[in-house]
Amino acid sequence: MSVTAVPVTPPSSSTRLWLWLGLVVAIAAALGLAWMGTRAAVAAKGTNEQFLAWNKGQSGVKTTASGLQYQILVAGDGPTAQEGDVANVQIEGRLRDGKIFQPQAGGPFQVQEGGAIKGFVEALRLMRKGSKYRVWIPSNLAYDEAPAGGPSDELKGKVLIFDIEMTNLMTAAEVMLRQQQQQQMMQQQMEAQGAGNASEAAPEADAKPKK
């Protein structure tokens, strides 16, 4: 039984070129993935500076002049927080290794220096009502300068990672108006209490001494 040989047409020069280009791209992609994996591993176990340098290049992450890094998870469509405003936020804080040091909780924070750690206040100034951010706060914007001996000692030298959702925002003018209303209410209550005490003491003051 004879077998008829089927002639194979040799690939053209253009086909060989595309084959070589495909091979080069595949090798480059493999090297790139290996490099990225190595860099990520170094960042995870390396210094804060190495981690932040790696994180800076991640998709959607922006870095401010101070070194704060943030990523917009939900943009929000409300007003942007201004100096003196009070933001009602939901937060959760963790460290680079994933350890949660701040369980999810909510509360008001004033958008001004001293209202919270520097990096947290800076993040609030970037946010709109209804937005949600993930922020990476370098240690120098967190607790490095906090007095020794406090509960924040274990967070010194750490990069803090917060998920922050701004659920409400009260302007500085609204805050001042509410404070004035509260002061007026307290003053009225004190005046009413004083008038009540005076009316109770009046019969004794008018009473004539017994002979």
Image (tube, grey):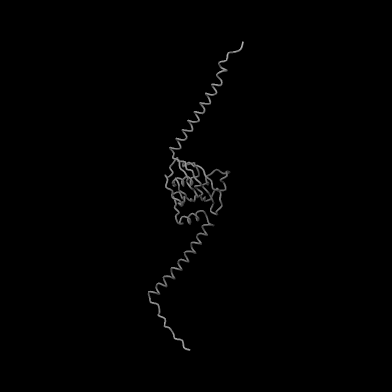
Q: Is residue 198 above or below residue 92?
A: above
Q: Nearer the viewer, residue 203 or 17?
A: 203
| x and y, in percent, of residue 4 in the image | 44, 86
| x and y, in percent, of residue 15 in the image | 39, 74
At a point 53% along the width and 44% down the height, the residue shown is: 146
Q: Is residue 153 above or below residue 29?
A: above
Q: Quadrant of the C terminus?
A: top right
Q: Nearer the viewer, residue 60 or 78?
A: 78
| x and y, in percent, of residue 89 in the image | 49, 45
Left or right position of 149 against 76? right
| x and y, in percent, of residue 167 in the image | 47, 45
- Which quarter of the figure has residue 176? top left
- Farthest residue in the bottom direction? 1
- Farthest residue in the right direction? 211
Q: How many marks?
A: 0
Q: Is residue 78 above or below residue 183?
A: below
Q: Nearer the viewer, residue 79 or 148?
A: 79
